[in-house]
Amino acid sequence: MTERYYKVYLLGYGGEHVIGTLTKEQYDFWKDLEEEDIINHAFWDPWDESDENPVFDDTDPRFLGNWYDLDDLMHENGVSAENALITIEEVDSSDYDAKILETLIENVSWEEFVEKYNIRRNHGLYRIYLSRVRCGKGLFRRVCY
C-alpha cells in the first residue's frame, strides 16, 4: 500500500488558552485583588511601573508575567468551529514544502464539512482521527501534514 500525505488547514478567528500553576504566595496575593489589577499586570505590560500594576519587579515572588507564559500545564490555540474554514490538500511527501498534488477541499466552512462528511461530536468536541500526523502551529491557523 502506497503512503499518501495530506495537508489540513484550519483558518479563521479563534482563541489562545493557557492553564498554569501559581505558587501559594502568588495565589494569596492575587486572589483578593480586582480583576482589573490582574488584567493590567498579565494582559498588558507586567514590567510597567504604574499605579495600575501592583507588581512590576520580576524578582518579586508574586510576579506573574505575561498571561501566555503561564502555561506549564497547557497551551493551545486554534480556530473556533463557528467561523472556521477547512482546506485539505494531497501532497507528495511529509516535507513542509511538499508539492501539492491535488486540492481536495478548499475554504469550505466547518459546518458544511461536518455535514457533508458526517463528522460526529463527542462530548461537545469534534474528533477527527488522522494517522501519522504532525502539526505545526501558527496564529489561529493549524497546518497538519
Image (cartoon, rainbow, N blue to C red):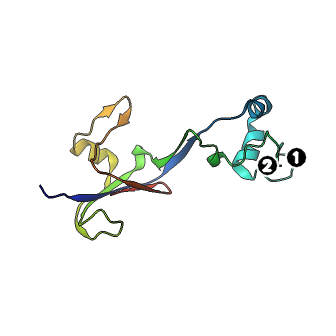
Q: Which residue is depicted at the point 38% across and 31% down? A: 124
Q: Measuring from the top left, give residue 83's x and y in whole percent.
A: 41, 49
Q: Earlier in the sequence, mark 2 or mark 1?
A: 1
**In the image, is 127 to the left or to the right of 49?**
left
Note whether residue 60 is visible.
Answer: yes
**Callout in the foreground (2, 1):** 2
Element carrying mark 1? loop
Q: The residue tagged with tag 2: helix, strand or loop?
A: loop
69 versus 73 height, above or below: below
Left or right of 63, for residue 125 = left
Q: Which mark is residue 58?
A: 2
Q: 98 and 15: which one is in front?
A: 98
**Quarter containing the N terminus:** bottom left
Amino acid at circle 1: Asp
Residue 106 in view = no
Q: Residue 3's x, y, as percent?
A: 18, 57
**Residue plotted at (72% across, 33% down):** 23
Q: Say which residue label 1 marks.
A: 51
Residue extending farthest left: 1
Seen from the viewer's position, the closer of residues 99 and 108 is 99
